[in-house]
Image: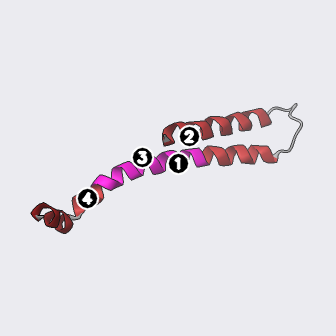
């Protein structure tokens, strides 16, 4: 479920950034910064999901003592 949420952050952030770069934009320029923040949060959220899916099997791989105890029981 995190991948669609990350995609929405990225798309909405880039949409805000794109709309605020036009010369006829009448509004606070801080929206551009808000758009970039949404974009970065979406990217970080996507990478955190990816690295967590890689890290969990690796921690099981290196916990050999606990795995041996679990196999005996």
Farthest left residue in view: 72
Dot placed on the residue nearer the N-terminal end, 3 or 2: 2
Quadrant in the picture for residue 14: top right
Residue where numbered disc 1 is placed: 45
Q: Secondary structure at mark 1?
A: helix
Query: Compared to 22, does 37 lie above or below?
Result: below
Magenta stretch: dominant secondary structure: helix
Q: Quadrant of the C terminus?
A: bottom left
Residue where numbered disc 2 is placed: 5
Residue where numbered disc 3 is placed: 50
- Name which residue lies at 86% across and 34% down: 25
- On screen, residue 30 versus residue 57, left or right, reads right
Neighbor class of circle 2 (other Cα within 10 Å; few <14, some 14-19, many 20+) is: few
Q: Secondary structure at mark 2?
A: helix
- Name which residue lies at 73% across and 37% down: 16
Residue where numbered disc 4 is placed: 60
Q: CA distance from mark 3 to mark 2?
A: 14 Å
Q: Is residue 21 visible?
A: no
Dot placed on the residue nearer the N-terminal end, 4 or 3: 3
The percent coordinates of residue 7 (x first, y second) are: 56, 36
Residues under numbered marks 3 and 2 in contact, where contact means CB atoms less than 8 Å apart: no
Neighbor class of circle 3 (other Cα within 10 Å; few <14, some 14-19, many 20+) is: few
Dot placed on the residue nearer the N-terminal end, 1 or 3: 1
The percent coordinates of residue 58 (x first, y second) are: 28, 56
Dot placed on the residue nearer the N-terminal end, 2 or 1: 2
Q: Which mark is residue 18?
A: none
Residue 51 within the segment the image draws in magenta: yes
């Amino acid at each position: 479920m995190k991948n669609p949420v990350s995609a929405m952050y990225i798309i909405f952030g880039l949409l805000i950034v794109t709309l605020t770069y036009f010369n006829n934009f009448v509004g606070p320029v801080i929206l551009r910064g808000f758009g970039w923040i949404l974009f970065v949060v979406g990217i970080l959220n996507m990478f955190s999901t990816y690295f967590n899916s890689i890290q969990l099997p690796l921690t099981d791989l290196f916990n050999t003592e606990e795995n041996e105890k679990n196999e005996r029981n």
